[in-house]
Amino acid sequence: MKFNISFFLIIVNFSLLNSQYTETINSNRPGSSHGAFSIGKNVLQIETGFKSSDFKNVNLKNSEILENKISYTIRYGLLLNKLEVFIDGSYNKNEISDLLKNESYNKSAVGKQTLGFKYLVFDPFKNKKWHSVNLLSWKKNRTIRLVDFIPAISIYTGINYNSKNSLSFDDPFSIIKKNTVYELNEKSINSKIGIITQNHFLGKWVLVNNFTLDRLGDSNSVFNYLTTLTHNFKNPRWSSFIEYEIIKNNVYSDNYYKFGAAYLLNKDFQVDTSVGLNHKKTPSNLNISIGVSTRFDWYKDEIPVDKKELKANKKRRKKNDKNIKRDYKLTKKQDKINKRFDKKERRLIKKNNRKNKK
């Protein structure tokens, strides 16, 4: 048993030390947070889901919105293992009971679309002293150490596009508030920036934190905080998660709780489900979600380059080139001397031959 665990830890550490790529799909679903690590160079990943939400707002005479949302994220490992480009988006279909105007209607809209880039700036797993496997002590490999609290850190940025019918500032009731004193319109284009941290504990727990400033360049920027804790079970196909989210701005603020599970059908395909809710009534929100994630894996292993050895080899080649040039010059010079000597020697021989004839 100890040998099997040590062997597993060696494999995990090897994959973390050498690249962001993993042998199995690494999806952000079913949570809403982004992980710090990219999916790997030349890997294309699609994460999509369906969410049904029930919103009620006591401040709007208990107006209700039943929202059905199809969301998607397309991720691609671009140029480097540390760099990822992604597109986030959604399509919403809402059944609205507007008790302010005493009317009911359906409304569909393309949700916010985001084109973004994520880059890993610090990877603690590259430090072999911190995250090497102790083959002599099974216990040390099964305890949380201080270095485990040093996170991987990524930064990301993106451009948001909002259609005319998109939700303004994440407020689900912005549709009802249109053409009233509560209406606030969001710009069609704005931006976002964020920091991501990720910690791994005991090979089974992963803690991800997202700190985001959204809708930058608009009259009401949004602060968003997400923390997600994921647990992998003994059966490696199963994992569960809990998540807490804060949305805060001058227009709409909320706290969300979410929990769920994911199942790995094969190394490139995952299914998931989750439930989310909040604890306020302006509005209240209860939702359920199902989703799938799949990837197209064109990743190729790259042989790690030892920069010190590369530099030393370059110096050796330069020195060898100098030696070859020097030897060539010396040889050429010696050839000239030899030619002169041969010429003199031939003259002497001719001269001696003439004397002998006489």
Image (spheres, rainbow, N blue to C red):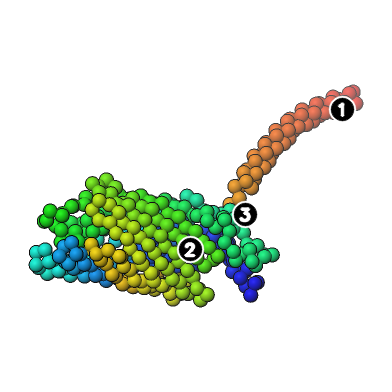
Query: Which tag is nearer the camera, tag 1 or tag 2?
Result: 2
At 11% across and 63% down in the image, what residue appears? 100
Rendered-image quadrant of the N terminus: bottom right
Residue most extreme to the left: 102
**In the rendered structure, which amino acid carries the disc numbered 3?**
Lys
Q: Earlier in the sequence, mark 1 or mark 3?
A: 3
* Residue 278 locus on image (x, y percent): 30, 65
- In the picture of the structure, the residue carrying the numbered disc 3 is 129
Of 318 and 59, the residue lying toward us: 59
**Tag 1: residue type?**
Asn
The residue indicated by pointer 2 is 206
List x then y, in percent, for residue 202: 55, 65
State yes or no: discs 3 and 2 in contact (Cβ < 8 Å): no
Image point (15%, 54%), residue name: 183
Q: Quadrant location of residue 116?
A: bottom left
In the picture, measured across the screen, residue 11 lies left or right of residue 195, that is right
Q: Residues within 10 Å of mark 3 (few under 14, many from 20)?
A: few
Q: How many marks?
A: 3
Q: Residues within 10 Å of mark 1 (few under 14, many from 20)?
A: few
Q: Are marks 1 and 3 in contact (CB under 8 Å)?
A: no
- Residue 232: image location, x then y, percent: 49, 70
Residue 203 has which mark?
A: none
Find numbered disc 1 in the image and state the secondary structure of the residue it sits on: helix
Checking the image for residue 353, the label placed there is 1
Count residues near mark 2 (Cα–Cα under 10 Å), then give few for <14, some for 14-19, many for 20+.
some
* Residue 69 place in picture, x, y as percent: 26, 68
| Residue at 89% over, 23% down | 355
